[in-house]
Image: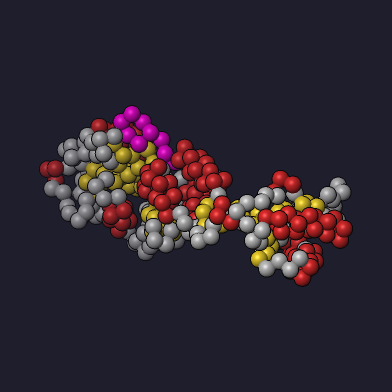
Amino acid sequence: MRLPPHKTLFRAPPDTGLPIGNLNSQFFANVYLNALDQFVKHGLKCRWYLRYCDDFVLVARSPAQLREWQERIAAFLAGHLALQLNPTRERLRPVADGVDFLGYIVRPFHLLVRRRVVGHVREALSKSGKRLVVRFQRATLYRFDGEALDALQASLASYLGHLKRASSRRLVAATWARHTWLGAYFELDRSALCLKRRARAPQGAKTVLAQYRHWLQAFPGDVVLIQVGAFVERLQWPPRRIRADAAGSAGESGLRRMRATRRGAVEGFPLPQLRRRVAAILAAGQDVTFVGQAGESGTRVMARRPVARWVAASS
């Protein structure tokens, strides 16, 4: 039998005490409750005892032994430390039921994640999904909001670091399958439970064409449109010159062909026409990725990153 974690409760007067979560509060809790440790180990002779700050667990072979210890601990805390046990956290249960301790359900041979933690993960993913993904009748729009993706990656990495210490492989797989949109932004290493960001900006690209090639590889099969100043272009890879008689004719995606350029642009249009042009490409059943300018890069070529990706419903 075991006695699950208790929280000591200190009735401090107003405007006194230490804030919860403050590192000093954790340190002083360990110092102040050292007297409890000495009492449990040397006074009660408890063999199996574990404490972290104000959470502690005792394990014994007899329920009667645990009830006796519980009464003696309550008396000791009140008489020596001016503390009292939190009655909402006092439970006497078999070890086989598991103990809710430090964010996990601790069972004899494995750890499980608290349901509350799972709920927090689902809530965080639901909020991020609403911000990043918009579903229309004919297409799904994936926004590449840098600030939102940075926050989501940090949150997911934190949760995965917590989950990897427990028996959570099936939980992670089910969560990933439930939120399929995550695959548009991250690659998940299921063995190590770590994330890799998709669509990272190319390092060392010195030309627009080199940037374009990178995004073609990142979004295979998509019609990739890239912003160049006030225009949006589709480039040819591998690059080739367009014959003079082909300039001005309609391309495969419905965009008007341009005159041949050094970077291999074959189709393009002014930036304000982006929405209409994307709708035409989606109507043809093709997915579209738009790469926009993101400011100076420190080199001769502007920095660019994905802004949005539209996936046709037929895809």
Q: Which residue is drawn at 50% across and 61% down?
A: 109
Of residue 209 and residue 82, the one placed in the foreground of this image is 82
Q: How many marks?
A: 0
- Specify the farthest residue to the top: 137
Q: Does the magenta stretch include residue 52?
A: no
Q: Which residue is drawn at 28% across and 52% down?
A: 216
- Left or right of 82 in this view: 210: left
Q: In this view, does 36 lie above or below 215?
A: below
Of residue 290 and residue 141, the one placed in the foreground of this image is 141
Q: Is residue 78 visible?
A: yes
Quadrant of the snapshot with the N terminus: bottom right
- Left or right of 190 in this view: 12: right
Give how far across and how far down residue 144 sits, in percent.
Answer: 42, 46
Of residue 48 and residue 295, the one placed in the foreground of this image is 48
Q: In which quarter of the image is residue 191?
A: bottom left
Q: Which residue is drawn at 63% across and 51% down?
A: 93
Give how far across and how far down residue 285 sits, in percent.
Answer: 23, 36
- Left or right of 232 in this view: 162: right
Highlighted magenta segment, given as a residue range? 131-140
Q: Which residue is drawn at 37% across and 38% down?
A: 141
Q: In this view, does 44 lie above or below 292?
A: below
Q: In this view, does 106 lie above or below 147?
A: below
Of residue 281 and residue 302, the one placed in the foreground of this image is 281
Give how far across and how far down residue 115 sits, in percent.
Answer: 54, 46
